[in-house]
Every structure is written in structure tokens, then in C-alpha cells.
């Protein structure tokens, strides 16, 4: 059997949400099925890290697809020709894109449909591409994989897809995430927050991550509590917008905000495990892996009461209205209480046991097999 896989987001040192999900699930699928030939399709020379086993054959297709017009070229010209050449039995795409021109059975993974609900958060050319093609991808796919029951229902509602066609593969969490000793936490705080306790945020600094309201909420928290707590922001400013900048400029305690930039998985683990709490108050998520990362580190979580986040966190986090800065600030104050923190850590530890990459990989494999 020959399965071709879109692996263009497997980039060394640049794995982000979807790329991590693809890597963690694909390596388990590949190793569990040595009888299958997997063709990993890249748009640039791949790092050998991603050539997981002998049954993986890498191929590089032109062009480097990082723009809507190049997406069309890559998926509607290069991919169909390649699938025909190797006589592929199946094409799997973990990042939402399919080939409308190929007759090979295809499985797609949709992580969320944020652009359908908050179109203003995206550059117009990308929005045009998503709005035009993703409904077609949903109809074209033999099966759809998604990461939460929320996202499954959203796909059904937005694209009128039969729910029986959609499989839910909850994300897992990297095994590197685990608690740190107090001595180790002290070292991390000395490095990132001048020795002070800190709240942390991790994610792409994108409008939907709600940084503007987080900055305002943190300012209100500082005024109410009068303490030395910092706010550490982990992520690149690639999607930094004027509203985010204005909210930051308006802060009276901006000197307490630390921008850590992009971190390796090892450093992210340490920053998460040493945090007072993870504050993840996006207004739209298909899943929310940072919630699980914090749970695994025995770090309390403050997260949003909308979209998929209550489904993932359940009662193991403080749920807040992401559009209400006072609600977020109140939760920050509340999580300072040691009894509250102890309860959240215990519940988070238990909730994290419900998720694993092995389970996700098994659901995806079964979805692939249903499509042939």
C-alpha cells in the first residue's frame, strides 16, 4: 500500500501547532505499519529528523508553498502529477489542504475554522483562499479528521458535512512536559523573570490569541494585587497587530511584561513548569495544546469558556470570558490562593491522563483505512 502525506509543515526548528500534531501522529503511524510505503511530500529539502523509518520515502515538490497562489500550484498541479506517478492508494493532508484535481482518495485534517468566524483576523488574500477552497476540500475528502467535538460540529454547521464522515482525534502532549523541582523552578525564574513569579502565555502572537485583552487584564490584576508577579509571553511577533500594540502601549505596568520569543520544546517545558499559571484566553481554538502542557507540568490553567477550551479543560481550569478583561484579572487574583492552586493541579494531572498521541494516531489510522 502506498500512502502519500503532505508534510510541508515539518520544518526543523520551526514546528508549531499543526506541525507538531503531524509529527507526533505520523511517527507513530509509520512505526506501527512497516508494511506500508509512506511518501512524505515536502516543499523544500527535509531534515532527516522527519524521515522516521525505512518505509518513509521523502520527495520534494515545487514550489515552496507559503502563499495562496503557490498553494494552488502545489496542490492542484504538483501533487496530482506525483500521486499519479507513484500510483498512490491514498493522500493524507494533516494541515487542511487537499488536491481538487486528483482522483486518489483523500483524507484531510481540519484543526479549526477560525477564519469563518473572525475573518478580520486574517490577511485578505489568505482569507479569500480559505473561504474559496476549504468548503470544497470538506466535500472532496473521503473522510475528515478533526481535534475536538467542538470543531467537528463547527465543520458540520459551516459546510453541511455529514457528521458520520468526521473522526475526532484529540491531540496529545509531548512527553517532555513534566513538573520541575522548586530548585529548578527558581533557576528558570531567575533567567526569565528576574527571579519573580510569573504568569505565562504561549502561542503565535495572533489576534485570536487575545493578547490585547490579556495585557489589559494583567494591568488590572497588578493594580488590584500590588505584587511582583510578571507576565512572560512566549511566541513570535509574526501576527502582531496595531490593536495589540495599542493595548501594550496603554499598560501602566508594561515593564512587568517579558517577551521570551520563540522557545525550543525543552525551554518551553521549563517555562511552563515554573509558571505561577498558564493564561490561555484565546477567543477561538480548535483544541488548545498549551492547556495539556500546563496540566502535565502541574501548572494551574486559566483558559476561555468558549469554543473547544471547556471541552479540553473541563473542571481542571479556571474558565473565563475571554472578552471580559475583569473576568480574566479576577481569575489571576484567584489563582494566587494556594488551596485553589492545589485543587487545579490535582484536577489537571488527572485530566491530562485522558489524552495521548498514541490514541490520536490510532484514530487517524482508522480514518485512513476507512477511506480506501
Image: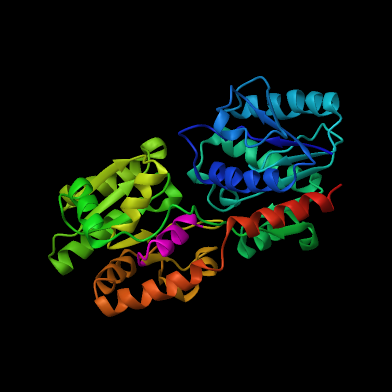
Asked which quadrant contains residue 317, the reply is bottom left
Q: Position of residue 227 (x, y in %)?
A: 13, 64
State whether the magenta stretch is mostly helix, strand or loop. helix
Tell me if 369 is positioned left or right of 364 in this view: right
Q: Residue at x 55, y 27 (%)?
A: 47
Instruction: Name the residue located 46 percent from the left edge and 68 percent from the top edge.
Output: 305
| Up/down of 105 relative to 280, above or below | above
State whether residue 45 is above or below residue 354: above
| Residue 137 lies in quadrant | top right
Can residue 361 be seen at all in this image of the molecule? yes
How is colour applied across the structure in the image? rainbow
Can residue 213 be seen? Answer: no
Q: Is residue 77 magenta?
A: no
> What span is colored magenta in the figure?
288-300
User: Which residue reaches farthest top?
Assistant: 62
Magenta stretch contains residue 290: yes
Left/right placement of residue 57 relative to residue 188 reads: right
In which quadrant is the N terminus drawn?
Answer: top right
Residue drawn at the location 47% of the way across and 35% of the way down: 14
Amino acid at each position: 500500500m502506498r500512502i502519500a502525506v503532505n508534510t510541508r509543515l515539518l520544518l526543523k526548528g520551526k514546528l508549531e501547532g499543526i506541525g507538531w500534531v503531524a509529527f507526533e501522529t505520523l511517527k507513530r503511524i509509520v512505526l506501527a505499519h512497516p508494511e506500508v510505503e509512506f511518501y512524505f511530500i515536502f516543499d523544500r529539502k527535509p531534515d532527516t529528523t522527519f524521515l522516521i523509518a525505512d518505509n518513509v520515502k521523502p520527495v520534494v515538490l515545487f514550489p515552496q508553498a507559503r502563499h495562496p497562489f503557490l498553494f494552488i500550484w502545489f496542490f492542484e498541479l504538483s501533487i496530482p502529477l506525483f500521486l499519479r506517478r507513484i500510483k498512490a492508494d491514498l493522500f493524507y493532508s494533516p494541515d487542511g489542504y487537499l488536491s481538487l484535481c486528483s482522483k486518489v482518495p483523500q483524507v484531510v485534517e481540519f484543526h479549526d475554522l477560525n477564519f469563518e468566524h473572525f475573518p478580520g483576523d486574517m490577511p485578505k488574500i489568505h482569507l479569500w483562499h480559505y473561504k474559496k477552497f476549504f468548503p470544497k476540500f470538506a466535500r472532496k475528502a473521503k473522510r475528515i479528521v478533526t481535534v475536538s467535538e467542538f470543531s467537528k460540529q463547527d465543520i458540520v454547521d459551516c459546510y453541511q458535512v455529514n457528521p458520520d464522515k468526521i473522526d475526532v482525534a484529540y491531540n496529545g502532549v509531548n512527553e517532555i512536559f513534566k513538573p520541575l523541582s522548586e530548585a529548578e523552578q527558581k533557576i528558570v525564574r531567575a533567567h526569565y523573570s528576574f527571579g519573580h513569579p510569573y504568569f505565562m502565555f504561549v502561542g503565535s502572537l495572533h489576534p485570536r490569541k487575545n493578547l490585547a485583552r490579556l495585557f489589559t487584564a494583567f494591568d488590572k490584576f497588578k493594580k488590584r494585587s500590588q505584587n511582583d508577579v510578571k507576565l512572560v509571553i512566549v511566541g513570535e511577533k509574526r501576527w502582531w497587530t496595531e490593536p495589540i500594540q495599542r493595548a501594550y502601549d496603554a499598560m501602566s505596568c508594561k515593564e512587568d511584561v517579558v517577551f521570551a520569543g520563540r522557545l525550543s520544546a525543552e525551554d518551553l517545558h521549563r517555562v511552563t513548569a515554573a509558571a505561577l499559571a498558564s493564561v490561555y484566553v484565546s477567543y477561538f481554538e480548535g483544541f488548545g495544546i498549551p492547556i495539556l502542557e500546563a496540566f502535565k507540568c502541574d501548572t494551574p490553567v486559566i483558559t476561555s469558556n468558549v469554543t473547544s477550551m471547556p471541552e479540553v479543560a473541563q473542571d481542571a481550569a479556571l474558565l473565563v470570558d475571554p472578552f471580559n478583561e475583569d473576568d480574566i484579572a479576577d481569575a489571576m487574583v484567584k489563582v494566587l490562593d494556594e488551596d485553589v492552586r492545589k485543587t487545579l493541579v490535582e484536577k489537571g494531572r488527572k485530566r491530562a491522563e485522558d489524552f495521548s498521541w498514541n490514541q490520536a494516531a490510532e484514530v487517524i489510522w482508522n480514518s485512513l483505512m476507512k477511506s480506501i
